Structure formats: structure tokens, C-alpha cells
Image (cartoon, helix red, strand yellow):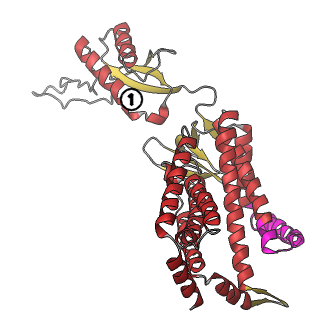
Amino acid sequence: MEWWERLAADFRLSSLWLELAVLAGSVALAYVLSRRAGRGQPPESVWFGRRIVDGLMFPAVVLALVYAARVVVEHYQAVFLLRLAVPVFTSLVLIRFVARVLAMAFPRSGLMRLMERVLSWLAWGVAALWIAGLLPRVLQELDDIRIAFGKSSVSLLALLQGGLSAVLVLVAALWAASTFERRVLDHAVADLSMRKVAVNATRALLLFVGLLLALAAVGVDLTALSVLGGALGVGLGFGLQKLAANYVSGFVILLERSLRIGDNVRVDGFEGRITDIKTRYTLIRAGNGRESIVPNESLITQRVENLTASDRKFNLTTNITVAYGSDAAKVQQILCAAASAQARVLGDPAPVAFLLDFMPDGLVFNLNYWINDPAAGTASVRSAVNLAVLEGLRTAGIEIAQPQRVVHVVASTSGQDGVAPAALPPA
């Protein structure tokens, strides 16, 4: 075969030791340059990654140096190793670019990891065909395969090239959106909710522009999108109105900032902390770990209690009943001291105890105290306060009231010996 004979001839005529030295020098120089340029860069950077060799910069610099060395060496002798290295590092640059951008934009998406693997195998396959010299022949075969769409036909090569162009354009759009978010929005927008809506709007806009560019690269007539837009509008008006309402409500919530990430809210009897506000739904996580997915339309049309709208303080209460003979002022002092001794309990406003009610079993006191970190859980601080209250009351000799019943013994009036049964009035 011609390609095999040409590779064998290049192998015999080339100086492998010289090419190996040039290749090793290019890799070492690329590592040094990338290491110096990557100082102080964040670990999620597409250019550098967590390690220098993980990012896009290192294979891109190696590719540039190897290609320049190949052009120079070819003027004096045949090249073999450098010719093989160019397609290898070209594929590595594409793989790193797609992998780093998808990992940054969708860190926990299994579908994105699958797409990354498919593109990686495709890139290595093209590199193998390039090295073997079979790529032009394969491209010609793909161009000869025609697929009919109504009265028009298109080659399989055009479809593959258009699909690859669309993927690269969309990945580039994701990269631009993530870079804008990290470099601009994180510093310019301090409010977490406003940053969320700005990120969603920026990503949607850039992806829309990228989609238009990708469709143009494939060869789709963009004027046909007007018909598609009209059909989509009709569909939203009928079948997708609830979905559209949730999306619009999500942007309204983020823009108005009536509800923000970190707020403690009560919705339809479910109380918890808002952990994330998506464009379609809001995630609310209760203190016991349960998570509720609430459609954004419900947060707009229904009554929602925002427990931290005015400030970040969160009130907790404890009721305790002591015996009637207890010193009320001493009980109040013990209750307030037990709450103040806890690190998470705020000093301003200070804990306060009230004599709430007179019950048949004893005096009912109500202890109020505040915390500013309900996301860390309320059960632990409530338990610590209750234990301190119990210890303080026991140390002071104050009896915690227990249910009591009074038995009245009534003497017999019938003139017979014995005692009539005792009357047990209701407590």
C-alpha cells in the first residue's frame, strides 16, 4: 500500500534520534512555559486545570512547537516522528478543550461525560487515519454517500462536518459563558440571586447565538426559523403554558429578590432553607435533610412565608413547666443563662424568658432565643439549650412539674360503717 510504503521510506530516511530530541525539547519547553503562565490560576481554569498537563495550554503549546520544528526539519531531511506527533497533539488539543469546558459547565452531568468519551474516540480515530494517510480516501467515501431529504440530498461528510462544527461552536459558547461568569459576574454582582439570574441569562444568550452560528455552519437556512418560532409560540400558548409560566416566574423571583438563596421559608406546610433557584423550580431543604422541589409558579401565586426576609435572625422557643412553689425570677434567670451559654445563640437580641401561663400542673415559662445560622440545623442548638436548662434547674433545686391529680375522700352519711368510694373530680 502506498501510505505504508511512504511511512516506511520516511522511517528509513529520517533521523529518529534528532526528531526524538526535538520532540522531547518541545514537550519540556511547553511544560516550562505553561507552568510559568499558570501560576496563580484557579484549578477550574480551562487553560491550565488542576495540574499543568491537564489543561488546554500544554498540548496547544506542544502542538505549535512540534509543527514549527517539523516545517524546519523537512527542509533538510525526511521526517517521521514529528509527522506522527502533529495529528496526535491536534487530537489531544480538541479532546482537552471539549473535556475541560464540559467539566466546568456541567461538573456532575453523566450525559456530558458520555459525549466527552464519544468525541475523544472520534478524535483519536481521525488521528489514526491521518497518520496512516487514509483520511483523504475516507473523506472521499463519506462524500460519495448521499442522503435524501425530500427533493434535496446531502452527503454524509457534510452532515458529519456540520455536526462537529455545531458541537465545537456550542462548546465555545459554554466556555465564553463560564469565563464571563467567573471573571466578571463573580466580582461585579455580590447578591447571589442576582448573580444566578445574570448567569442564566448570559448562558442562554450565548448558547442561542452559538446555536445560530452552528446552524449556519451546517447550512440550515435561518429564515426557516421564523416558521419554527411561530409554531413554538402556538405550542407555548396551549400545551406548554405551565412550563412557560414556571420559567417566567423563576426570572421574576430572581429579579425581584423576594426570595433568595439561603432564605428560610415555609411553603404549603413545608419549612426549610432555599438551596438553589432554578429557572423552572426552586429547591427547599428541610432541617431533617428532606428536599422539596417547588415549581416557581407556586411561589408567585401562593402564600409563602419568608422567615428571614427582614433579617437573618431565626427564633427558637422552649416551653418548660415548673412547680408552683418555684421562684419565678430565679427560673427566668436560669433559662436565659442556659441559652446565653451556647456559642450559636446570639447575644443581640439577648435570650428572654416569660411566665407564659398558669396550668394545673405548674407555672409555664417560655424561653426565646435567636440564631443566625439555621442552615447548620436547629436540633443541635435546641438540644444544647434544653440540657443546660435541665442542669440549671436541678442545680438550683427547682422541681420540674409533673402531672398531678387530687383525690378527695368523702365520709359516708348513710349511718353504716365504712367509707364511701372516693369521688374523683376531673383535673
Left or right: residue 277 versus residue 379 is right
Relative depth, front residue between 203 and 163: 163
Quadrant in which the C terminus is drawn: top left
Above or below, 383 against 55 in this view is above
Q: Is residue 11 above or below residue 416?
A: below
The x and y percentages for residue 391 are 26, 19
Residue underneath mark 1? 382
Q: Residue at x 72, y 63 (%)?
A: 169
SS type, badge 1:
helix
In the image, is residue 11 part of the stretch drawn in magenta? Answer: no
Give the residue drawn at x 58%, y 80%.
129
Crowdedness of circle 1 by 10 Å Cα count: few (<14), some, many (20+)? Answer: some
Residue 144 seen in the figure: yes
Magenta region: which residues? 214-242
Q: Of the residues shown, which amino acid type is indicated by label 1?
A: Arg
Q: Position of residue 309 (x, y in %)?
A: 63, 31
Q: Going 73% across and 91% down the picture, which residue do you hit?
A: 144
